[in-house]
Image (cartoon, grey):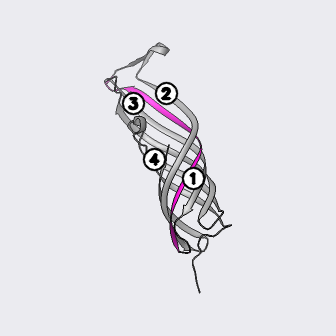
Amino acid sequence: PFGLPHFSAGMSSAGLLLGVAQPTGTGGFDRFVGPGPEAGLQWMHYLWDWIGVGAEFDYFRLGKKRFPFPEKPFADIIGEASGLSLTGLGRVNLLRERSWSPFVIGGIGYHRVSLKANVLANTPGGQICYVELAACAESFTFVSTVTGPTVTAGAGIEVMLFRGFSLAAEARWRQ
């Protein structure tokens, strides 16, 4: 009889991740950038029927967002960000021998994020003076890149569509 596969010890899987990255209010980051696309590749190996370990490589791009410069009412900032992360993951499936399974996932890794901010005058013909450069212009662009550890946690549900192919939906938090 036809049967859908389930997770079992020794099984490995590779996956393509597609989704939307949404900045959070941590430190006001959501004021600078908006949501944008995220894509990744994931590999998992199941040590036991319930538990898998693996790695994930992600790229995300947070969209442009314009907002008033808080301390300078004559200037606006347009921010955008992009980044890469490499994360070691652990996953626990919550059901076994079914055609679907809810799961929890978490991990730690390393990231590199670039933030680009374009500061521009918001009045016609206006200029902004940047003291450190001893220059005035209609706009200035600043790029800052940070690297460091990253932590992720999430939950989702995976459905086996047919042998060797499944579809999952999950929500993740990443710091």
- Is residue 165 covered in magenta? no
User: What secondary structure is found at the residue carrying circle 3?
Assistant: strand
Residue 151, quarter of picture: top right
Q: Quadrant of the N terminus?
A: bottom right
Position above or below: 45 against 87: below
**Most common secondary structure along the magenta stretch:** strand
For the residue marked with disc 2, what is the amino acid?
Phe
The answer to whether residue 101 is magenta is yes
Instruction: State the SS at label 2.
Output: strand
Question: Which of the two discs, 4 and 3, labels the residue nearer the N terminus?
Answer: 4
Mark 3 highlights which residue? 77
| Residue 142 numbered mark, or none | 2
Could you tell me which residue is drawn at 55 percent across and 33 percent down? 146
Which residue lies most toward the bottom here?
A: 1
Q: Is residue 36 visible?
A: yes
Q: Residues within 10 Å of mark 1 (few under 14, many from 20)?
A: some
In this rendering, the answer to whether 117 lies above or below 138 is below
Residue at left 42%, top 35%?
27
Q: Is the Cβ of the residue at disc 4 closer than 8 Å to that at disc 2?
A: no
The kind of residue on which mark 1 rests is: Gly
Mark 3 Cα-neighbour bin, 10 Å: few <14, some 14–19, many ≥20: many
Q: Give the residues in magenta.
A: 97-124
- Which residue does the numbered mark 1 point to in the structure image? 40
Residue 29 falls in image quadrant: top left
- Residue contact between numbered discs 4 and 3, judged by CB atoms under 8 Å: no
Q: Secondary structure at mark 1?
A: strand
Task: Work out how far the residue at label 4 is from the one at label 2, CA to CA, in angstroms.
Answer: 20 Å
Residue 32 visible: no
